[in-house]
Image (cartoon, coloured by chain):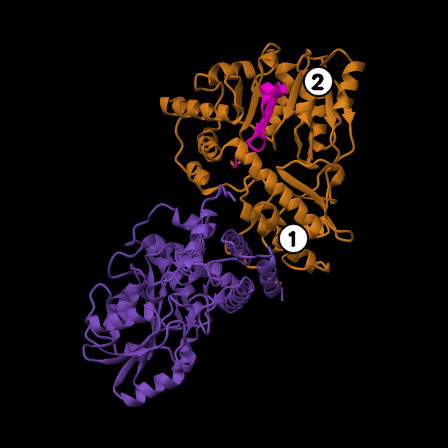
Chain colours: A purple, B orange
Amino acid sequence: MKFYNFKGERVFTPGPVEIPDRIREALSKQIIHHRTKEFTEAFLKTRELFKKLISNPSENFVFFASSGTGAMEASVQNFFKAGDKVVAVVGGKFGERWAELGRCWGLDVIELSIEWGKSVDPEAVEDVIKKHPDVKGILLQMSESSTGAYHDVKAIGEITKNKDILLVVDAITALGVYNIKPYEWGIDVIVGGSQKAFMLPPGLSILWFSEKAERKLNNRAYYFSVKKEVEKQKEGQTAYTPAITLILALKEALEIMLEVGIEELERKYSKMAEGVRRALEELGCKVFPENPVISLTAALPPVGIEADKLRKVLLSMGIRLAGGQGKVKGKIFRISHMGMDYLDMVQAISSIELALKELGKKIQFGKGVGTYLNVIYS
Amino acid sequence: MKFYNFKGERVFTPGPVEIPDRIREALSKQIIHHRTKEFTEAFLKTRELFKKLISNPSENFVFFASSGTGAMEASVQNFFKAGDKVVAVVGGKFGERWAELGRCWGLDVIELSIEWGKSVDPEAVEDVIKKHPDVKGILLQMSESSTGAYHDVKAIGEITKNKDILLVVDAITALGVYNIKPYEWGIDVIVGGSQKAFMLPPGLSILWFSEKAERKLNNRAYYFSVKKEVEKQKEGQTAYTPAITLILALKEALEIMLEVGIEELERKYSKMAEGVRRALEELGCKVFPENPVISLTAALPPVGIEADKLRKVLLSMGIRLAGGQGKVKGKIFRISHMGMDYLDMVQAISSIELALKELGKKIQFGKGVGTYLNVIYS
């Protein structure tokens, strides 16, 4: 089976995700200088749009010219001081990152380890807090991108919201996908990244924080100083040179997203995720996480087929999926829903049907796609 | 069923077709002046590449800054004089165009009419020639884009090649799809257009001609003068301002096409066409032409469903197909294979499955796609 792709490779990885034309057009514009009225106006408009995404009336959020990890580091630097005790939920590569960042900045990190692919039990969080009443923060992922597991931040918010504990949520693969309600749910810090549901290139991170978190702000950070940035950014400027092009393109991205609306976006991704999961199971794959997110699907290939072999065959058809990371390297494959349209996923599923057949599996062509279409049509 | 397409509409019309990124990058470059060594060199390189597409050792071809109809007009103007008797095969909108152009330029046009959707019988052509031994040319489509019918130019070439008759072939939706062998088959004029298998925007047409046709060249044309253009173009220049950007992007397009090779391209399109036809029939549609081309598929929707209604539902999902033209307006729908990759077609077929369901037809989701995948995998 030979594939010749005029259009080149299609990127189905959970970040970076494919960039829609409207955003590419914005990205291809000539640079403007950032210390200008033009930039200030565009930036303020972008900030207004961002507020709508999480029903946020405040100015407590900043953009950094960095990848998402930068905003994770900023969360640790700005809201905690050396010696502060925090709980890091570790059930994947990005949970590990929280623990590493905490230790790097002198925090006393309690690792709440869970099996990769599992979601944290809110009662386990409650137990740790009871055992350590001096805990100052819970660091976790809403969507653990390395395993595709969903952590119930809302339930954990119920535990932390009336305590002197900050709930710090890496929502890099959740922001713009889920209708996150930080006030209602009791979230104190939200971290996001441009190359996920915002459908932008990497290089822009987002850090949102609550009034409760605001009261904890310190002066430890320099480049990632939330205090300095928020003062400047609410006036439409930045402390250091911003990722100008990404900020301007973010405006376009937010417009695309808000034309749909975050509630409807969550519905779209939810349906897409359910369809993909059922289709993969129909094809003999096994969804990896116990409680999966809707922003991506992580799955084990059918028994006897290596995940990376499957990905290699898919790549020969011009379809790029992601593999596993850390402990599940080589074991799983991951498909993004972020930035994808309903009909994009029929390409992903069809190519998996073809690849499994190519690898010797008995496949009734169209069965996976049919299962998917049944879900999205319902 | 609500569709939100981040990526906007997908164009499955048989021209214009979607433009691959590599070509879009070429198109987005800053303009260069055409009366320069830089342009001349690029143009000569483009011409060299074009020769490989139809195994053509000669310099007998020109590009016009026009749509395909311009090169059709040029064929009539340059190779025939007023009063010349020609046969126009009329079995669709583009056959009608040959007849109209012939009359416009004073030719004595004999219309060989066939039912729309049918292919011309080479014997019928032979009969007309016998009845009219003074016929100077046969004008026809290799691929009649309005009906999706294939006319057997090779068989007709057998009839005309040793006679004083020019075989003039509109190959606008055939060039770059079929492995056309003009010398072997006895074709005298080939017309092509940029927005079809070349995956470029419209605005560039191609006219190739044989040595036999060269001997007939006259001086009637001005803008479409083949004589003037061929003299200039074989030296890397043009008589009038060329479509600079399209010429430069054509180089990229030809490189993409020749990386695959025309034989393999024909194989790809052939498989794709067979898969699409079988899938549509599986879904209750009826392929319209008797002997279909491989560059596009024209089909009737299932009984009881209006073609334009179907297209409207598809458009609401972000999928644009073409409708019928002329006599079959409102009756058929048409899907391009030109410029498409194998996995693009699973989007087209899936969307038709969804749309037919939406229009009340009993559809087992995935059946059309499965049928298609079976063909392309074979």
Residue A328 position, x and y percent, is 37, 65
Q: Is residue A287 above or below residue B113?
A: below
In the rendered view of the protein, which quadrant contains the N terminus of chain B? bottom right
Residue B171 position, x and y percent, is 61, 28
Q: Give the camera-side residue of A39 and A118.
A: A118
- Few, some or many C-alpha atoms within 10 Å of disc 1 (few <14, some 14-19, many ≥20)? many
Where does the magenta region start and end? B175-199
Q: Left or right: where does residue A196 sit relative to residue B65?
A: left
Does the magenta stretch mainly form a helix, a strand or a loop? loop
Name, please, the residue furthest toward the top.
B215
Query: Residue visible at 60% across and 41% down?
Result: B271
Q: Is residue A285 visible?
A: yes
Asked if the magenta segment contains residue B178, the reply would be yes
Q: Give the camera-side residue of A270 and B101.
A: A270
**Residue A238, quarter of picture:** bottom left
Identify the residue position indicated by label 1 in the image.
B368
In the rendered view of the protein, which quadrant contains the C terminus of chain B? top right
Q: Which mark, residue A334?
A: none
| Secondary structure state at the residue bearing disc 2 | helix
**Residue A101, quarter of picture:** bottom left
Q: Give the camera-side residue of B118 and A252.
A: B118
Q: CA distance from mark 1 to mark 2?
A: 41 Å
Identify the residue position indicated by label 2 in the image.
B159
